[in-house]
Amino acid sequence: MKLTLTVNGTTHTSEVEPRTLLVHHLRDNLGLTGTNIGCDTSSCGACTVHFEGQSVKSCTMLAVQADGGEITTIEGLADQAQQAGISTGDQDWHPMQEAFHQCHGLQCGYCTPGMVMAATSLLEENPDADEGGVREGLEGNLCRCTGYHNIVKAVLQAKGGA
Amino acid sequence: MIPAPVEYTRAGSAEEAISLLTEHGDEAKLLAGGHSLLPMMKLRLATPAQLIDVGRLDELRYINADNGEVAIGALTRHTELEHSDVLADACPLLKHVASLVGDPSVRHRGTLGGTLAHADPASDLPAAVLALGGTLVAQGPNGRREIAATDFFASYFESVLAADELLVEVRVPSGGGGWNYQKFNRRAQDWAIVGVAVADGGKGIALVNMGATPLRATAVEAALAGGASAAEAAAVAAEGTSPVEDGNADATYRKHLARVLTERALNAAG
């Protein structure tokens, strides 16, 4: 069926099977491979993107459920920050990306796109989150490398700098 | 994992959803947030031929407190319950329990009506609505009917909703006495191994994951009504339960948890 999605500010019209998961549409049809597939069971959060401004797990949403809506993926976050006038650092990244970079909030990097998207949504919803609030707010995103300390540090730094 | 091939229609109104249900019968499943149904479809535990998407029916997304009760549209999302100022005043138990479902991204999609209709005895919100003595409103081809929460859950993943009915509203009493929710699990974002919801100072108590449906702890309620202490009443919390045995816990341990968590919940509810 016909599907129209605005992804990172660009509107795409595609023909998809109804059973196509949003993450597969983003990766396989639109070539946006920054969003990773981890557990594929809505546990790990690697596939987190923003739908209508809120974090969602794109492995547990049909692409057609998002028809007519707006999606932001990790590829679009820096552009979004630039448009909002909040980008930062040498690369003009989103403050969350810059904070992950500065705080070394990643090791292998597989969880990072989902972690960054969940963290930006978390601060949008709870701008005053303290360390406990950040840890609880990221409960849906698993990292098997870092032990989370530098991720939490990064989110708190982004909160201060954003 | 990709679900089996399926047809998809987005309903533009509750009436259209019901007419599609009438047309497709048992072959159809309603899709709200999809966070229970889609994982089951990926595992082929559910293989509907037709999905009817009600997730965008904003007419069924509201929280209104009036005349001593709170009416909540069935498609209200967990995140909206969790952040509701109306619920903070009128029904803090429901607000709190909603904040413990899954994780924030799951709560952005999941809906109150969806979790009730899914009827998973391990889910949090069905037990909260049961403890509160809520009323569920179903709409079918011949209009609406009210179903008491105590009559709504039939068995594992089964409610008394007919194949052509859509859950449209949930009503719970506002105010009431002390409340508490105890959720015991081993990993963040997981289902409760056992949970206990206490509403209105112990007049309504419901157990999570202690049988085929969420269960009212009627023995505990009766003991409290007869003047028993929290500890005495909690001692009978496992009466009438038949919990599953799984990798997390055997039945004996679940019964132990039910007693311990009930005592904690009653003490905390005051």
Image (cartoon, rainbow, N blue to C red):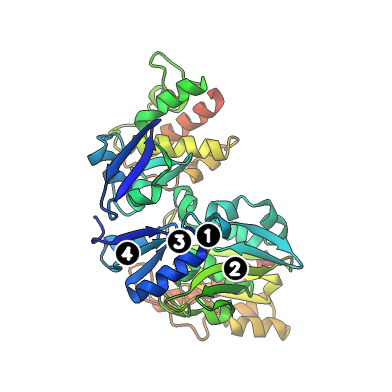
Residue labelled with disc 3: B185
Residue labelled with disc 2: B170
- Identify the residue shown where x is 24% and y is 35%: A31
SS class, disc 2: strand
Q: Quadrant of residue B91?
A: bottom right
- Identify the residue shown where x is 34% and y is 29%: A75
Q: Nearer the viewer, mark 1 or mark 3?
A: 1
Callouts 3 and 4 in the same chain: yes
**What is the three-letter code of the residue carrying label 2?**
Val
- Chain containing the residue with disc 2: B
Label 3 vs 2, first from the N-terminus: 2
- Chain containing the residue with disc 1: B
Label 2 vs 4, first from the N-terminus: 4
- Chain containing the residue with disc 4: B
Residue labelled with disc 4: B40
**What is the three-letter code of the residue carrying label 3?**
Asn
In terms of depth relative to the viewer, which is nearer, B190 or B150? B150
Callouts 1 and 3 in the same chain: yes
Callouts 4 and 1 in the same chain: yes
Circle 3 packing at 10 Å, graded few (<14), some (14-19), many (20+), is: some
Circle 2 packing at 10 Å, graded few (<14), some (14-19), many (20+), is: many
**Label 1 to label 3: alpha-carbon separation:** 27 Å
Residue A121 against residue B214 in the figure, above or below = above
- Chain containing the residue with disc 3: B
Residue B209 against residue B14 in the figure, above or below = below
Pinpoint residue B81: horizontal percent, then vertical percent. 59, 55
Name the quarter where the C terminus of chain B is drawn: bottom right
Residue labelled with disc 1: B75
Residue A25 left/right relative to B159:
left
Q: Quadrant of residue B72?
A: bottom right
**Label 2 to label 1: alpha-carbon separation:** 10 Å
Return the residue found at the far top.
A90
